[in-house]
Image (cartoon, rainbow, N blue to C red):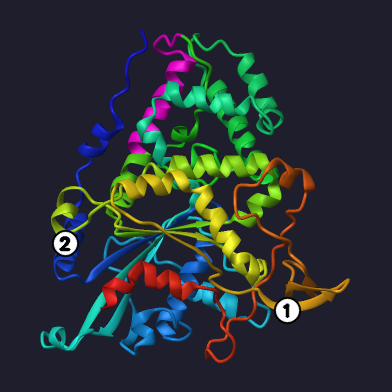
């Protein structure tokens, strides 16, 4: 009989917070009581545009420009913003200055993508709305804490509710179907040579983990797939003991003590308890607001298997978050996210007349996750946005038709290009859509960020996203 592993949630409860964590918790609860602190999680999968969004969001709040749909700014009540220094024990500081410098360079480039946990604190000063409330004090501050996460690490959260056997069965099932089967062939052939009930040899475990990791990276790089667990195999983190990353799924069967199957299960359990559970406890259980960034255009380019994979990945990851009321008492006992925004990124890569379809397709993609949030009392918001533009919209005539096109510099190309990016279905793509091969959306280099704010808007609907995420706290 296979022994049950100790519950990861039990391990999570046993992790006592450090004195610095306790102190920050007391400070944060005091701030929450005064309605002064808001924690915003910027989440999403790989290449969703999280780093660009945080950089652009902070830049525009600091400058106070180009935010007409943020009510506090439109009404002249947003008095200013400033970055706050990190506190002892805080996460590494998000590289805002480097990201803004990359966008503002004479030859602008996209900031380096998220590779580790980072955060920053921004103090927003605003005038209170309403004459009666202003009697309590004309001005107030909101401390906006923005936390950025590698998209790959999100994939580990569902492991907290899966045994090694259940995870192995699901992962091996995926590896047997196209397009994964060919990419996983070398790893699966190696597993077939092993006696999984014999005493474990460390070199066998290391080789199996190496080949499994190689398969995951190929699936990410060559097939554009995202449902690749554990996430830290494709985006490593600092792990004290190297063998914590030396495991992989194995076919079901007996697991005598000391066998390879027993060793792999033990390492999986330790990985969940010592890496994933503290990560969840320290960071993911304390959100107030959440934005989920999704690169739909690149996924459409990759075809139906990649699109289905994205839908399954998002559904799995979104089950790891808690939604509902998050007043002070609720936060003391069970933290919950009370505002959820889904954003289709890179909206500037298609013409304006396609933005509504992009938003509708996003709604269909995350329909199940959104329905669960609504059941918990949260009404999600959906938006198609570009945190920083790489294109302009132009109209051209072709065979007597006026087409809405985009003009910009293709990524890794010095030339300005005008092209018709194609159309986006308002519903999940049909078989005819895929067979037509009509999804060929291109990536563009960024336009140079204007630090003085003069000129046409440099983003698309970033201010609408801000209004949905923090507008009610700037009243």
Crowding at label 2, few (<14), some or many (≥20) Cα neighbours within 10 Å?
A: some
- Magenta span: helix, strand or loop, mainly? helix
Is residue 15 depicted above or below 285 in this figure? above
Is residue 92 depicted above or below 254 in this figure? below
Q: Which residues are magenta?
A: 254-274
- In the picture of the structure, the residue carrying the numbered disc 2 is 29
Whether residue 441 sits left or right of residue 16 in the image: it is right
User: Can you tell which quarter of the image residue 208 is in?
Assistant: top right
- x and y percentages locating residue 27 in the rendered image: 17, 65
Task: Kindly report which numbered mark, 1 or 2, lies closer to the viewer in this rendering.
Answer: 1
Which residue, as the protein is rendered here, is positioned at the far right? 399
Is residue 348 depicted above or below 66 in this figure? above
Q: Which mark is residue 394?
A: 1
Residue under the point 58% across and 28% down: 174
- x and y percentages locating residue 317 in the rendered image: 44, 43
Element on which disc 1 rests: strand
Of residues 416 and 184, the one nearer the viewer is 416
Element on which disc 2 rests: helix
- Of callouts 1 and 2, the N-terminal one: 2
């Amino acid at each position: 009989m296979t022994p049950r592993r100790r519950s990861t949630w039990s391990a999570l409860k046993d992790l006592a917070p450090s004195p610095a964590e306790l102190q920050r918790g007391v400070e944060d609860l005091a701030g929450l009581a005064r309605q002064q602190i808001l924690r915003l999680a910027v989440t999403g999968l790989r290449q969703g545009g999280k780093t660009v969004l945080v950089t652009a969001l902070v830049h525009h709040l600091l400058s106070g420009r180009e935010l007409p749909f943020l009510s506090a700014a439109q009404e002249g009540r947003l008095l200013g913003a400033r970055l706050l220094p990190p506190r002892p024990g805080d996460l590494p500081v998000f590289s805002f200055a480097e990201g803004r410098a990359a966008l503002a360079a004479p030859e602008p480039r996209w900031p380096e993508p998220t590779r580790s946990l980072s955060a920053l604190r921004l103090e927003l000063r605003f005038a209170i709305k309403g004459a009666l409330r202003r009697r309590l004090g004309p001005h107030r501050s909101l401390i906006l804490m923005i936390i950025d996460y590698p998209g790959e690490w999100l994939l580990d959260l569902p492991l907290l509710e899966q045994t090694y056997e259940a995870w192995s069965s699901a992962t091996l099932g995926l590896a047997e179907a196209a397009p994964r089967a060919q990419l996983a062939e070398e790893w699966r052939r190696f597993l077939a040579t092993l006696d999984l009930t014999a005493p474990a040899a460390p070199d066998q475990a290391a080789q199996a983990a190496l080949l499994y990791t190689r398969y995951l990276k190929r699936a990410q790089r060559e097939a554009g797939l995202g449902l690749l667990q554990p996430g830290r195999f494709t985006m490593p983190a600092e792990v004290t003991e190297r063998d914590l990353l030396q495991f992989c799924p194995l076919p079901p069967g007996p697991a005598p003590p000391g066998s390879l199957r027993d060793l792999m299960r033990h390492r999986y359990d330790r990985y969940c308890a010592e890496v994933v559970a503290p990560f969840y406890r320290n960071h993911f259980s304390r959100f107030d607001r959440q934005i989920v960034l999704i690169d739909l255009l690149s996924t459409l380019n990759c075809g139906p298997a990649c699109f289905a994979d994205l839908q399954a990945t998002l559904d799995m990851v979104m089950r790891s978050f808690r939604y509902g009321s998050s007043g002070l008492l609720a936060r003391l006992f069970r933290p919950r996210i009370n505002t959820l925004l889904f954003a289709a990124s890179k909206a500037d890569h298609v013409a304006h007349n396609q933005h509504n379809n992009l938003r509708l397709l996003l709604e269909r993609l995350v329909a199940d996750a959104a329905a669960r949030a609504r059941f918990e009392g949260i009404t999600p918001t959906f938006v198609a946005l570009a945190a920083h533009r790489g294109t302009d919209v132009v109209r051209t005539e072709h065979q007597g038709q006026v087409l809405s096109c985009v003009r910009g510099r293709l990524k890794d190309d010095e030339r300005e290009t005008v092209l018709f990016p194609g159309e986006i279905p308002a519903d999940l793509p049909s078989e005819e859509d895929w067979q037509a091969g009509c999804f060929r959306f291109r990536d563009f280099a960024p336009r140079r960020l204007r630090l003085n704010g003069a000129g046409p808007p440099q983003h698309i609907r970033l201010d609408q996203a801000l209004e949905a995420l923090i507008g009610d706290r700037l009243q």
